[in-house]
Amino acid sequence: MIVFKINKLSPGKSAFALEKDIEKIYMQEAGEASHDFNAQGSQRNVQEKVLNRLGIGSWKWEQPIAAKIPQLLIDAVGEEVLGMGPVMNTIRHNYPAIIGCNWSGGGGHALCVDTITTVPGIGTYAAICDPWDADVHIQKIDIGQPITYIPKQGIGFNLWGDTKDATDREARAKLNQPMPAPPTGTITGIIYRT
């Protein structure tokens, strides 16, 4: 997702990277002969190393106290301001970042933030791109406060094909099982372009 977002407007660069190629680089950096990403996920420090090998700039992983992440995220992604206009907002925009979410019930998840917008008098919002359901979740963030992420089901249609969320919903429907309530997570780290 990051390679696409960085290279989509770069002349002469491919916006697409093959997932298998990225997985191969991950296993090299992790020192593993094989890796089941569906069962094990990926480690954030290894994600940083992979990004640094993909030719899309220099990337850094940080895990500060959770209350410092909103400002780090704004500094990394840039902050657009509603009403400022497209030229000024384009100048203020930087690069997408990966944020690490630790679920309250255990485990974790990587998410991409590509836009942060402040609406004067209302608040600051991050556009969180979640690869699990292929949705963009708009999340309010406050400087000096931890970011709590609750991925509520979006309204829209899927242009991306199969997603983990859709596969899970289909399996539960066949078994006549209800979907569980969305998990709650805390953003605990960030990988950003330096």
Image (cartoon, rainbow, N blue to C red):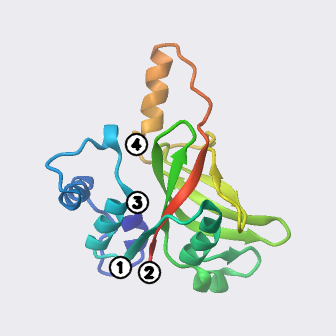
Dividing the picture into quadrants, the one containing residue 2 is bottom left
Helix, strand or loop status at disc 2 = loop
* Mark earlier in primary sequence (1, 4): 1
> Going 71% across and 68% down the picture, which residue do you hit?
143
> Going 59% across and 37% down the picture, which residue do you hit?
183
User: How far apart, in angstroms, are the residues tagged by discs 4 and 2?
Assistant: 32 Å
Helix, strand or loop status at disc 3 = loop
- Identify the disc placed on residue 1: 3
Q: Are marks 1 and 3 in contact (CB under 8 Å)?
A: no
x, y percent for residue 160: 42, 47
Query: Which is nearer the eye, 32 or 77?
Result: 32
Dividing the picture into quadrants, the one containing residue 8 is bottom left
How packed mark 3 is, by other alpha carbons closer than 10 Å (few <14, some 14-19, many 20 or more), is some
Q: Which residue carries the number 1 mark?
A: 57
Q: Nearer the viewer, mark 1 or mark 3?
A: 1
Residue sitting at the far top: 176
* Mark earlier in primary sequence (4, 3): 3
Q: Say what amino acid the circle numbered 3 marks.
A: Met
Q: Say what amino acid the circle numbered 1 marks.
A: Gly
Helix, strand or loop status at disc 1 = loop
Q: Nearer the viewer, mark 4 or mark 2?
A: 2
How packed mark 1 is, by other alpha carbons closer than 10 Å (few <14, some 14-19, many 20 or more), is few
Q: Which residue carries the number 4 mark?
A: 161
